[in-house]
Image (tube, rainbow, N blue to C red):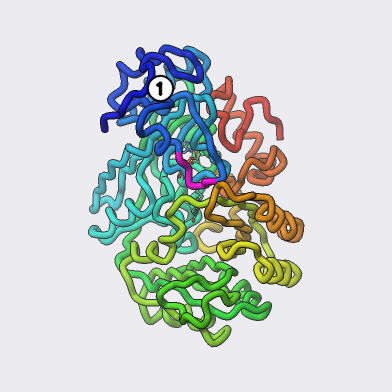
Amino acid sequence: MQATMTHDATLSSLTGLDLRPLEQRLRGTLLRPGMATYDSARQLMNRAVTRRPAAIAQVADSQDVVEVVRFARDRGLPLGVRSGGHSPAGYGMVDDALVVDLSGMKRVTIDPDARLARVEAGVTSGELAAFAQPHGLAISTGDTSSVGFGGLATGGGIGFMVRKYGLTIDNLIAAQVVTASGKLVTASEQEHPDLFWAIRGGGGNFGIITEFIVRLAEVRQILGGDLVLPASREVIRGYLDYVADAPEGLTTIAHLMHAPPAPYIPEARVGEVVLSILVTWVGDESEGQRAVAPLRALAEPVADAIAWMPYPAIFNFTAHQAVPICHRIRSVLTHEVSDEVVDAALEAVERVNSPFSLVQFRGLGGAMARVGREATAFAHRDARYMVTLLALWMDENEDATPHRAWIEAVWPAIRAIGTGAYVNFLEEEGHERIRQAYPLPTLARLAEVKRSYDPHNMFRFNQNIAPAMSA
Ligand SMILES: Cc1cc2nc3c(=O)[nH]c(=O)nc-3n(C[C@H](O)[C@H](O)[C@H](O)COP(=O)(O)OP(=O)(O)OC[C@H]3O[C@@H](n4cnc5c(N)ncnc54)[C@H](O)[C@@H]3O)c2cc1C
């Protein structure tokens, strides 16, 4: 795409640096403030966050990433990394920095016989699902089609089939990584195994991943969709008691929320407080019906939109999430959700100040729990649930104070049950919360790998593991 220049092309208005040497070496495009596509390129999924980088390098391939990293390293420039732009903290853009934008790197190559895919970092969950479907293959990624593979698959990846196939990182075979020294290396069990361990849960701390090689599973059709139940303590309790020990083919994500005007929800019930359970069953259809039956038995459904469908169709149920919106998030991984927390969540949703805000419950366990605690940097393998508060509002000019206050009122109750945190669901919440994302031995090992691969903390605009960090 040809960008329109509106000011001196040789200087970044924010740093005064001559960027031409970099521009000349790139196959992609270097955007600076004032160029026509600069503002759309710096847009993030969390519209509550606005950042103005000095320049955005829209890279075309791994070599471009190498060039940007070397350029930044040689000049000591702050360097940001963006793939899909979904970081709740808005880490995908950094004020006054040079940002590597991998969102244009969208090549996917599938070897159907080996059931392997090479996936560039800018590919989104929905794109990958659509690409793999004709081969009868899939991988468990995020719950929203627009989530970028780059950030998802470095933090963990808790997806629609996590109980059946584990985290996204559990299916990672190898990755191409540009390190802080500007080298492109392969990380796998055989090559740079310490780096390979760290990038599976350690986030963007260790380098920029340009391409992932992942194992796919045979998934053509699923029993999937939305089961909407009237919300009550008994229904939520029944849901929680069932889902973490349900047959492994069944993964669910439940939203305690005001019923949205979805086409399958009766008009008269829109706005009612409901538990909307997104269901994904992988396996035989009639077995799936049996697995879902205990959920259907919890209450007379407000709506039952569960059907036999191609796997990518499940993303239709979260299509409204794939648009930029303002949000604030607080989340815990936990072993148990007490009745007090259920009551607090219900009360919070009943008095919510935005029709979009919600409490999310995810049942975990299954394949995710069978991977060893030391096997990857994501170590909270024994968590049975993830509980997440999401304040959501549309207008970035709206005063965020009431939305923040809504979160703050219920957060202490949720926080108290936390046994860990998921790094991809953190905002900028301080070191204490990063420590909750990693048990102490994991954190110590991450800091050690950081010292080897990024001793000067070049990759620091993230949930940062500082080289000097001690457990
Ligand atoms: C609507 C929505 C739904 C979500 N649903 C889920 C879900 O179901 N399951 C789940 O697990 N998570 C989910 N997430 C969280 C998501 O996994 C994280 O936000 C993740 O960081 C998104 O990746 P991204 O590439 O889009 O983000 P970006 O904002 O582009 O990147 C975030 C950070 O990740 C790192 N990073 C990104 N790309 C690379 C790369 N190529 N190499 C190295 N580091 C990189 C960098 O530190 C970067 O700053 C969701 C988020 C949103 C907003």
Mark 1 residue's CB less than 8 Å from ligand 1? no
- On the image, the x and y values in percent for residue 52 come to 50, 30
Q: How dense is the environment of label 1, judged by Cα within 10 Å: few (below 14), some, or many (20 and up)?
A: many
Dividing the image into 4 quarters, which one contains the N terminus? top left
Query: To which residue does mark 1 refer?
Result: 68
Identify which residue, 330 or 289, lies in the foreground: 330
- Above or below — where is 332 with respect to 99? below
Magenta highlight on residue 44: yes
Indicate left or right for 465 with 282 as reference: right
Residue 57 visible here = yes
Magenta highlight on residue 244: no
Residue 194 visible here = no
* Residue at horizontal 53 percent and vertical 22 percent from the top: 78
Query: How many marks on residues?
Result: 1
Dividing the image into 4 quarters, which one contains the C terminus? top right
Identify which residue, 276 or 320, lies in the foreground: 320
- On the image, the x and y values in percent for residue 152 come to 47, 46
Choose top left, top right, bottom left or bottom right for residue 49. Answer: top right
- On the image, the x and y values in percent for residue 254 come to 55, 68
Q: Which residues are magenta?
A: 43-47
Q: Amino acid at mark 1?
A: Val
